[in-house]
Image: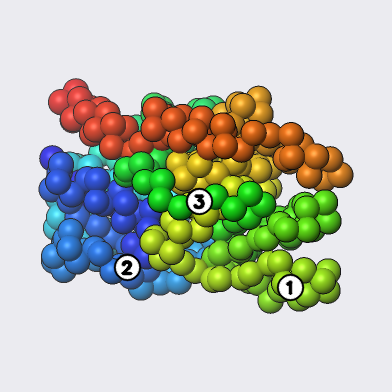
Amino acid sequence: MKLVLIGDGESPHLLKWARMLAPRVRLAAISSRGFAPGWELLLPDADRLALNTSPDHGGGNIAIVKMLPRVGAWLAATDADWIHAHYLTSHGMLAWAAKLGWRLRAQIAGSAWGSDILVTPNQGGAYRWMTKKVLRSCAVTTSDSHFMADRMRELGAREVMVFPFGLEAMPRQNAKKQPWLCFANRGLEPIYRPQRVIEAFARIAAAQPEARLVVANDGALRAALEADVAARGLADKVTFVGRLDAAAQAGHYARSTWFLSLPESDSVSVSVLEAMAHGCVPLLSELPANREVIGDSVRGLIVGALDDLPARMAALDTTRLAGINRDWVAANGLFEPHVQRFLTRLRELSTT
């Protein structure tokens, strides 16, 4: 079976999909940006097309649309069985338009990433129309939460497979937890509400003077956040470390007891699963997908009002939760079994 991935080749998430798929299908890939290091180990240059645009997560990516003739011609020459689009309102649109315009025989599979379903369709009628068109063009789609899958069905998705974008393997436990060390690594952009993370930590630090916070990743809000931390007198307690490679990030997960992720919209975050696999206790925003992951405060806390947050944290047995969370991810959050199930379904649909 020949499959073409379409997505952001600079994203570690798409590269993870590629690592899983490459041994199991004849793989090719189209990236709206370039390709991160690691792709060359999986695919030769001839099987990769880099469009080298600069998409904006906020939308309005006309540069991608302008690449349609190049994409359509490349896909026609590639003649794949499946086009697998990641992030439906940009790369999914490309797949749909190319199939229509070049009369490709390939079927389309689509993987929703979160805001493409939970945010973009609400930005106006044109976005909603496009999302519906893309979903209906997909023979099968994937979602990492039941909440998002329900929304996809409301928008016209034909078949939705639900599984977490999980871990490739369980990490080893090789570091001692620091009891009040907190870690946050979502993008420093408005949708992820990093300001809320700082506000939450300020309450935690007021109650627990030994508390520390490490903020990884980068984004448009970083300078403002650093200024706010300084203004709060927390500069000695909060460290901004920027973008991290996988090994450095794993070290922070391993040492941290708490993981903060407080976006305004989200599906099941792979960062949350990674943190739990390392034995962190997640502190999450009030979203349906987050409740799917931690249950009714079984594996972490939903953060609403901040006044009682330190007391709620202090009441938890974090050592016990570390083991519970690792066991839950091992049973529910590994990626390979779900990829195998996904490919089995593609092969079934190829013969019908």
Q: Which mark is residue 185?
A: none
| Mark 2 crowdedness (10 Å alpha carbons): few <14, some 14-19, many ≥20 | some
Instruction: Kindly identify the residue that appears in the image at 15 percent across and 26 percent down.
Output: 351
Secondary structure beneath dot 3 equals loop
Of residues 145 and 310, the one nearer the viewer is 310
- Viewer-nearest of discs 1 and 2: 1
Asked if 229 appears above or below 317 in the picture, the reply is: below
Residue 341 place in picture, x, y as percent: 27, 29
The residue positioned 31% from the left and 56% from the top of the image is 15
Residue type at numbered disc 3: Lys
> Looking at the image, is mark 3 or mark 2 earlier in the sequence?
2
Q: How is the image coloured?
A: rainbow
Tell me the distance, in whole angstroms, between the alpha carbons under discs 1 and 2.
Answer: 33 Å
Residue assigned mark 2: 36
Q: The residue tagged with tag 1: helix, strand or loop?
A: loop
Within 10 Å of disc 1 (Cα), the crowding (few <14, some 14-19, many 20+) is some
